[in-house]
Each structure stands twice: as C-alpha cells, then as structure tokens.
Image: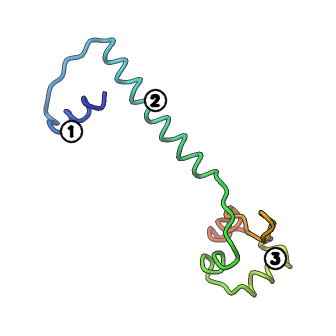
C-alpha cells in the first residue's frame, strides 16, 4: 500500500484503475492509519508528566518562592512522586491557558 502512495506522490496526475475490492482495501488502510495516528495523539495528550520545581519555575516564569506560596495557598499544589515534590503538568497547563 505504501508503494501505491509513493507512486501517486511522484506522479500526481497518474490515472489508476482499481477493482472494487482493491478500492475498499485502500480506503480501509487509510482509515486504520488515520485512526492509529489519532489514538497516538490522544494518548500523548493524556499522558501526565510531573516537572520539578525548577522546571515549573522556568515554564511559568516565576520564582521558586512564588511556587512555594502558590502551594501553601492551594493555587498550584505539589504532589509527591518517587519521594520528590513535583507538579502536575495538567495543572500548569491550566494556569498557562488562563484558568485556575
């Protein structure tokens, strides 16, 4: 199937005759390939990361003291991951998007 797409890319004005069954196979291939790409994008978007205090300080362009105050006030809470204090990237993104 990839060879067919390569041929089309090299010769965009080419005329191709397909049997009905081959057309269905081609459409199914395209749908499945697109589905896998979308599933990967969704998985990547839903994967939570936990940056350190210094990383968050750089991302939000605030001091580590500000992060400490935000944690105490509940604005941006830390969590413990592997015995270290970290932040949820999803919480940071909410701040960056103007929420929270």
x then y, percent, for residue 52: 69, 73
Mark 1 or mark 3, which has the lower sequence index?
Answer: 1
Quarter of the image with the N terminus is top left
Q: For mark 2, does the 10 Å Cα neighbourhood hold few (<14), some (14 to 19), or many (20 or more) residues? A: few
Relative to 23, is 12 above or below?
A: below
Relative to 33, is 57 above or below?
A: below
x then y, percent, for residue 79: 80, 66
Q: Choose between 24 and 82: the one closer to the eye.
A: 82
Check disc 3 and report its element: helix, strand or loop.
Answer: helix
How many callouts does the rendering have?
A: 3
Mark drawn on residue 32: 2
Residue 5 sits in quarter: top left
Q: CA distance from mark 1 to mark 2?
A: 20 Å
Mark drawn on residue 71: 3
x then y, percent, for residue 70: 79, 79
Check disc 1 and report its element: helix, strand or loop.
Answer: helix
Mark drawn on residue 53: none
Residue at image position (72%, 64%) is 88
Query: Badges 1 and 2: C-beta atoms under 8 Å apart?
Result: no
Mark 1 or mark 2, which has the lower sequence index?
Answer: 1
Residue at image position (68%, 61%) is 90
Label 1: which residue?
A: 9
x then y, percent, for residue 10: 16, 39
**Drawn side of residue 30 relative to residue 5, left or right:** right
């Amino acid at each position: 199937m990839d060879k067919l797409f390569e041929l089309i890319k090299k010769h965009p004005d080419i005329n191709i005759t397909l049997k009905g069954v081959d057309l269905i196979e081609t459409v199914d291939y395209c749908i499945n390939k697109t589905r896998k790409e979308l599933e990967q994008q969704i998985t990547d978007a839903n994967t939570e990361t936990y940056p350190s205090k210094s990383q968050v300080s750089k991302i939000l362009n605030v001091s580590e003291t500000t992060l400490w105050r935000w944690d105490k006030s509940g604005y941006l809470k830390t969590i413990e991951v592997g015995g270290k204090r970290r932040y949820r990237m999803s919480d940071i993104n909410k701040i960056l998007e103007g929420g929270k």
